[in-house]
Amino acid sequence: MSIAVTLLPEPTGEVTCASCAARCCRLTVMLLTDTGVPERFIEYDDWGGETMAQGDDGWCLAVDRNTMLCTIYENRPLICREFEMGADECLTERAAAFA
């Protein structure tokens, strides 16, 4: 059985992180490799694994809420590096933000 996903149009018509509701920045991000994420942005889960710190509202603390851009872009986690802007995963999260 296949499920059809309907993507809603972007508010600006363009796929960019700056114009996004940034749902990907509210996902749990495991730190699997050392990319130099500053310690202030690291939390530890119940099993001792490192994750990106999130605020009470679920947003990644490394996101500048005024610009919606990552403040540690050059040192962002591997998962964030692989979550490519405009790729299927990105578009799915963006569609969920507008649902």
Image (cartoon, rainbow, N blue to C red):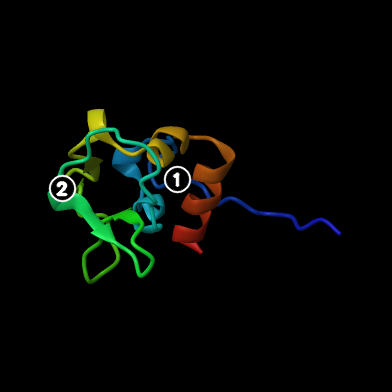
Taking the image as drawn, is residue 53 in sight? no
Location of residue 45 in the rendering, given as x and y in whole percent from the top left corner? 34, 65
Observer able to see residue 12: yes
Residue at label 2?
A: 39
Relative depth, front residue between 6 and 65: 65
Which numbered mark, 1 or 2, is in the foreground of this view? 2
The residue at 86%/59% (across/down) is 1
**Could you say which is closer to the camera, residue 80 or residue 64?**
80
Identify the disc placed on residue 68. none
> Circle 2: is it few (<14), some (14-19), or many (20+) Cα within 10 Å?
few
Secondary structure under the numbered disc 2 in the rendered image: helix
Which residue is drawn at the image coordinates 34% and 39% (left, top)? 77
**Which x, y percent locates residue 41?**
19, 51
Q: Please tell me how crowded label 1 is: few (under 14), some (14-19), or many (20+) other residues with Cα within 10 Å.
A: some
Residue that badge 1 annotates: 10
Name the quadrant containing residue 28.
bottom left
Asked if 78 appears above or below 21 in the picture, the reply is above
Instruction: Quote the CA–CA distance across marks 1 and 2.
Output: 34 Å
Seen from this angle, which residue lies furthest right?
1
Give the amino acid type for the residue marked by disc 2 in the picture: Glu
Q: Please give the name of the residue rendered at 20% of the width and 54% of the height, measured from the top-left corner.
A: 61
